[in-house]
Image (cartoon, rainbow, N blue to C red):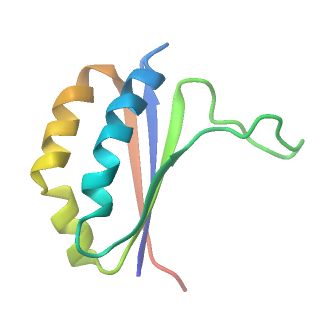
Amino acid sequence: MIHVIAVITARPGQRENILTHFRANVPAVRAEQGCIEYGAAVDAQPALKFQTACGPDTFLVVEKWESMEALGAHAAAPHMAAYAGKTREFIASRVIHILQPT
């Protein structure tokens, strides 16, 4: 199994715009072969004192895939290219962590 944590930071005030496109794309991603989990998350409110907040312009994409091959197919999927085209101008930064359980 492969875990992915994507940290997406929007340009100021554009997070909800990106999330609208993200939510529209979720059914296509979840229908992909090998997708176990795929969803967005933002800072919990209220949070506990030990939380390190991501901030109002950032969200995380939490993913689980059956294999690296499934993740590779996801990255190459036409609906992901379309999503990237719709959101590119609103994204300030994107950091992708690809992890495997130990």
* Looking at the image, residue 74 lies above or below residue 81: below
Total tally of numbered discs in the picture: 0
- Residue at 22% across, 38% down: 83
Name the residue furthest left.
Answer: 78
The residue closer to the viewer here, 31 or 56, is 31
* Residue 39 percent location from the top left of the image: 46, 52
Looking at the picture, how far across and down is residue 43, in whole percent? 67, 38
Residue lying at 60% horizontally and 24% vertically, measured from the top left: 56
Q: Nearer the viewer, residue 2 or 83?
A: 83
| Residue at left offset 32%, top offset 61% | 30
- Tell me: residue 99, above or below residue 78: below
Q: Please give left or right for residue 3 compared with residue 51 in the image.
A: left
Image quadrant occupied by the N terminus: bottom left
Q: Residue furthest bottom?
A: 102
Left or right position of 64 against 67: right
Instruction: Name which residue lies at 46% across and 31% down.
Output: 9
Q: Position of residue 74 (x, y in %)?
A: 21, 61
For the view shown, which residue lies furthest in the right direction?
49
Picture quadrant of residue 84: top left
Left or right, 47 with reference to 62: right
The reply, left or right, for residue 52 in relation to residue 16 is right
- Image quadrant in which the C terminus is located: bottom right
Residue 61 location (% of width, % of height): 46, 49
**Residue 99 vertical position relative to residue 81 in the rendered view, above or below:** below
